Amino acid sequence: MARSDEEYDYLFKVVLIGDSGVGKSNLLSRFTRNEFCLESKSTIGVEFATRTLEVEGRTVKAQIWDTAGQERYRAITSAYYRGALGALLVYDVTKPTTFDNVGRWLKELRDHADANIVTTLIGNKTDLKHLRAVASEDARTYAEKEGLSFVETSALESINVDKAFHTILAEIYRIISKKSLSSSADAAAAATLKEGKTITVAAPHPNAKDGKPCCSS
Amino acid sequence: MEKKRLDDHEAATISSPRSLDRFGFLVRPDASTSDGLVKSRSAQFERIREDRRVRKWRKMIGVGGSDWKHYLRKKPHVVKRRIRKGIPDCLRGLVWQLISGSRDLLLMNPGVYEQLVIYETSASELDIIRDISRTFPSHVFFQQRHGPGQRSLYNVLKAYSVFDRDVGYVQGMGFLAGLLLLYMSEEDAFWLLVALLKGAVHAPMEGLYLTGLPLVQQYLFQFEHLVQEHLPKLGEHFAQEMINPSMYASQWFITVFSYSFPFHLALRIWDVFLFEGVKIVFKVGLALLKYCHDDLVKLPFEKLIHALKNFPQDAMNPDILLPLAYSIKISRRLEELRQEYEKKNGKITQSREFTEEQTVQRL
């Protein structure tokens, strides 16, 4: 089967989650299109974007699903956790409740996502310095306790956004490559070996013949 | 070029430095240039045709809607045909209230809205405030922080969240309320929202917003089957590429096309939606897929998702899309699929049985 016009070695599916209004959609548009929209609409349902980049010398395509943050939407959005290798869990550094809810989002992941999903905690909106209400140290301590990586970002000022995505993609890459070295059977369980040397690691890819669709309603 | 600059200059000195389309949405500078000149030629013809239509409509509804019910009983097919051609913009607000049954609710419940807005408190207040500036952010009425548009939007949503605490406030409702507020007062918009969600004329749609979003799930189930049956080749392609309707059609149902579709198209869909019910949302969805069918079947997963969220301009032309939608017959199958879904998943329970007496009693 023909490869799509873009060549890549790996395809990683990542979900963006977190409370409503923390800036998930703008993190995504900053990362994939280098755009930021001050007058953005709230996300209804799910949105999707991709970006291909170099990670540890390999070409990785990040396939990112941006989800509506309001609790009631989890009825639709949680289906998208399935098959995701990474989750960017975003809170707003100026709104303590969005940080307090991080625990509930982690539970959502435990309930609906694959057990070994790589999760990065992101404190967004650091540009609003005078309004900061969640200290970096508190978040870092929490992230360490939960075994998450942690990055603070500003989608508005384009600070650390690439770093946040790089961090999670590199971490996923390390796990995948370790797996495929140690046991090809293991790798096959987590990834679908494509023709050539490409490993696809996401359900909703045309060439992934087996497995269920990543989401069903 | 010279002419254009002059026009811009005049517009700037008279009112706002930013240009708006005829519905009050900000126009991106790049989107308005050559297009306007081409359109002006047929504008006069359009105006004459529109005047004739308005006269016909005025006769049909009578003063303040006094003849409406009579006319509707006598000539329902004429009403249906005229609505499908589009309600004149200057009468839209009134007609929407007549066809949705909201006018009757308003008259039967005097003072209720005011009480909900002023005296009651809602658990959703902060959620609503958070989304106010994220609802139609490019419309002049809703742009000003704490301006009249944002205040009305807040009031309507808060009132509804108190009126039905099981639904409360859910993202997406703001687009419904916002669209209505461009055509009617706060109180009228509130009762129209009630008419829709509680089912004054058609089946209630509150299940779109109740916990678990049960009606969204049912609609997506129905839509997926309709795609497979009406557009088998595309349905097959979707299955192969692992595309399911929750990826592209949830917004269509949750906001009745008001979230991201061109406003003039959304209005035309709403005309029919309020009169004929949610069926038109399915039909328009199928019509879009049908119109773009030959392109869509060729696209791989990622491009397919993109295409399903960004339909080309010509597909969005209401005078092409809507006739195509009307030609798709789904009523019987839609009902069968609903029963099938209910058999599998159980009946969607409503938050509260709705009768007019109860509305009055409760408040």
Image (tube, rainbow, N blue to C red):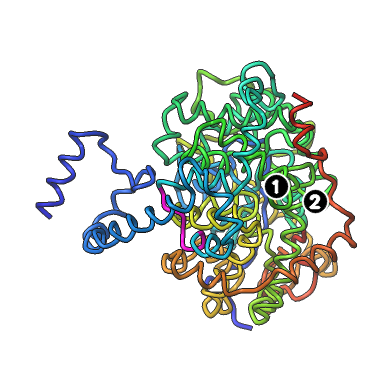
Q: What amino acid is labelled 2 in the image?
A: Ala
Viewer-side residue, B207 vs B201: B201
Residue B48: horizontal and vertical position, in percent? 28, 59
Outermost residue, left direction?
B2
Residue appearing at x 37%, y 53% in the figure: B55
> Both on one chain, marks 1 and 2?
yes
Q: Which residue is mark 2?
A: A113
Q: Which residue is mark 1?
A: A87
Q: Confirm or deny contact between disc 1 and disc 2 (CB under 8 A).
A: yes
Q: Say how many tags the image has.
A: 2
Q: CA distance from mark 1 to mark 2?
A: 9 Å
Viewer-side residue, B119 vs B276: B276
> Label 1 is found on which chain of the structure?
A
Segment tinted magenta in the rendering: B83-89
Question: How crowded is the residue under tag 2: few (<14 C-alpha within 10 Å), some, or many (20+)?
Answer: many
Residue appearing at x 60%, y 65% in the figure: B285
Residue A204: horizontal and vertical position, in percent? 69, 66
Which of the two discs, 1 and 2, labels the residue nearer the N terminus? 1
Residue B275 sits in quarter: bottom right
Determine the secondary structure under disc 2: loop
Residue B306 sits in quarter: bottom right
Q: Would residue B333 be seen by someone viewing this image from the given angle?
A: yes
Determine the secondary structure under disc 1: strand
Q: Quadrant of the N terminus of chain A?
A: bottom right
Q: What amino acid is labelled 1 in the image?
A: Ala
Outermost residue, top direction?
B119
Q: Is residue B225 left or right of residue B184?
A: right
Q: Quadrant of the C terminus of chain A?
A: bottom right
Residue A104: horizontal and vertical position, in percent? 79, 35
Question: How crowded is the residue under tag 1: few (<14 C-alpha within 10 Å), some, or many (20+)?
Answer: many
Residue appearing at x 57%, y 45% in the figure: B98
Residue appearing at x 69%, y 19% in the figure: B121
